[in-house]
Amino acid sequence: MLPYVRARLFLALPTLLAVTLVTFFLGYLAPGSPIDLLVGQHADPAVRARLEHEYGLDRPPLVRYLDFLRGALHGDLGRSFSNAGRPVSELIAEQFPVTAFIACAAVLLAVMLGVPAGALAALHHNRPADRAVMGLVLLFVSMPAFVLAPILMLLFALRLNWLPASGWEGVARPAFYLLPVAVLAARPAALFARIMRASMLEVVRQDYIRTALAKGLTHGAAIRRHALKNAFLPVLTVIGSSFGYLLTGSFVVENIFSIPGIGYESVQSILRRDYPVIQGVALLVAVVFIALNLAVDLLYAAVDPRVRLQGAR
């Protein structure tokens, strides 16, 4: 297993380099200068020159990119142009826990809703329960977050006045994040339900299920002991990528609900041309994607002993 992990980590390096390269030069090619937002377009040239030198903007792009890579290796992602020049790593450390909490809660909710719904649909194949579940799946797969969020906000916050429309008061105040978590979880829950239904339909037709029933096991016991775990494996493989989707999806949801996570900060940084923050967040998201995919692969092998990873042989 260890050689496999080493090989995956080695392959991740080109991906991380590509992410940093594309993010850096897209920021460099973007029109305008962050100095314009700090001092205005008509500021004293001497002041502009001093600020450009202070933030390293007067150096060649390749030198700045290499400096960024060198700093990233030591945990230094540079200083934010806005936010009073605070270190980017400090900003991310402050805001990432909020985003991670929202994303984890959404994944948990999606699994709790999607997996049982998919199993229920499969066990009632072509009956009203199956059609109802698949109708909801189609609805939530088709509905983007920026459409669902205002609908839930209008209904539960403005119409019924059950929940606050926006804001963040910490994890101890769930009323403030119930709606964002529900919006983020809707699409992954629908995907999990669809995958679980298809997988369950295939598993219940396998010979080992018929053998278990022939040995006298009840249908419910055969489903619980043999079908559910094997049918869940395809869902497990998409949970990691879904978590990545939720991290990027939080960019929209955090801005709609005014949640101070990295999604909210990233959008504000794009508007302010705060390139160091954008680069730092892009690098962080890439690292999280790679780590989650690796974790899912290892977990898949641990759950299903039939799986033999090539590197473990």
Image (cartoon, rainbow, N blue to C red):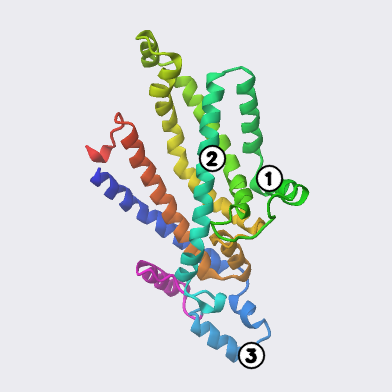
Mark 2 neighbour density, 10 Å: few (under 14) some (14–19) many (20 or more): many
Q: Earlier in the sequence, mark 1 or mark 3?
A: 3
Q: The disc labelled 1 sits on which kind of residue? A: Leu
Q: Is residue 240 left or right of residue 126?
A: left
Q: CA distance from mark 1 to mark 2?
A: 15 Å
Q: The disc labelled 3 sits on which kind of residue? A: Asp
Looking at the picture, how far across and down is residue 231, in whole percent? 44, 27
Residue at 45%, 15% in the rendered image: 219
Foreground disc of the pair 2, 3: 2
The quadrant in which residue 139 appears is top right
Q: In this view of the protein, which residue sits in the foreground, 127 or 282?
A: 127
Is 34 inside the magenta-drawn segment? Answer: no
Q: Which residues are magenta?
A: 58-78
Looking at the picture, how far across and down is residue 218, in whole percent? 42, 13
Looking at the picture, how far across and down is residue 28, in whole percent? 54, 69
Asked if disc 1 and disc 2 are in contact, CB closer than 8 Å, the reply is no
Residue placed under numbered mark 1 in the picture: 148
